[in-house]
Amino acid sequence: MSSQAPAHEDAQEAHHGHSHGHEAGHGTFRSYVTGFILSVILTAIPFWLVMAGVFESRLVTAALVMGFGAIQIVVHMIYFLHMNTKSEGGWTMLALIFTLLLVAIALAGSLWVMHHLNVNMMPMSPEMMKNMP
């Protein structure tokens, strides 16, 4: 039996040595409750803004709802997905940053193309549209 114990300890050390720094941190009950409470608050405030008609401008209300949505995405990534700069050796954060960069480029490019198409389109009056085939 004494010959098996050191081999078992070596196997445990090897297992822990390979996984060190590559596993995402597991959340505690307190962190899950904190994330849940923040998520409820970040859902209730936009709901109240829309249902109570707090702002006259729909644009302001929409911007605030989208802002709260963006904050909620960050809360979910931190508290539920356990994303930080240390998990997976920083690769998950790098992948997130790269994804956000690609989304920003795609959105900005799409808006730029749509704006220039709108500016460069020939204006049509209602009478001209009636005569179109």
Image (cartoon, rainbow, N blue to C red):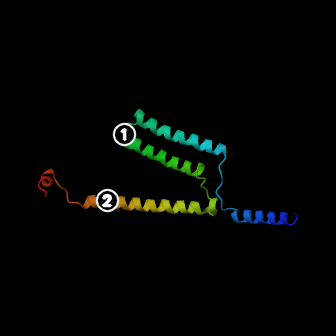
* Residue type indicated by callout 1: Ser
The C terminus is located in which quarter?
bottom left
- Residue 97 visible, this angle: yes
What residue appears at the point 59 percent right and 49 percent down from the top-left corner?
80
Q: Residue 73 — which label?
A: none
Q: Which residue occupies the extreme top position in the image?
A: 52
Provide residue 77's location: percent of width, then percent of height: 56, 52
Q: Secondary structure at mark 1?
A: loop
Residue bearing mark 1? 57
How many numbered badges does the structure rendering display? Answer: 2
Instruction: Name the residue at 48% across, 44% down.
Output: 68
- Up-down relation of residue 57 to residue 100 (above or below): above
Compared to residue 118, the image places residue 37 above or below, namely above
Residue 30: x, y in percent? 66, 43
Q: Residue at x 61, y 53 (%)?
A: 82
- State which mark lies toward you, 2 or 1: 2
Q: Whole-percent x and y of residue 34?
A: 61, 42
Residue at 56 percent of width and 42 percent of height: 38
Q: Residues within 10 Å of mark 1 (few under 14, many from 20)?
A: few
Image quarter of the N terminus: bottom right
- Asked if the residue under mark 1 is in contact with the one under mark 2, i.e. CB atoms within 8 Å, the reply is no
Label 2 environment density (alpha carbons within 10 Å; few <14, some 14–19, many ≥20): few
Quickly name the residue at label 2.
114
State the residue lying farthest toward the right.
2
- Asked if residue 125 is positioned above or below residue 47 in the image, the reply reads below
Alpha-carbon span between mark 2 and mark 1: 25 Å
User: Three-letter amino acid code at disc 2?
Assistant: Met
Secondary structure beneath label 2 = helix
Observer able to see residue 54: no
| Left-right relation of 128 to 51 | left
Residue nearer the viewer, 54 or 29: 29
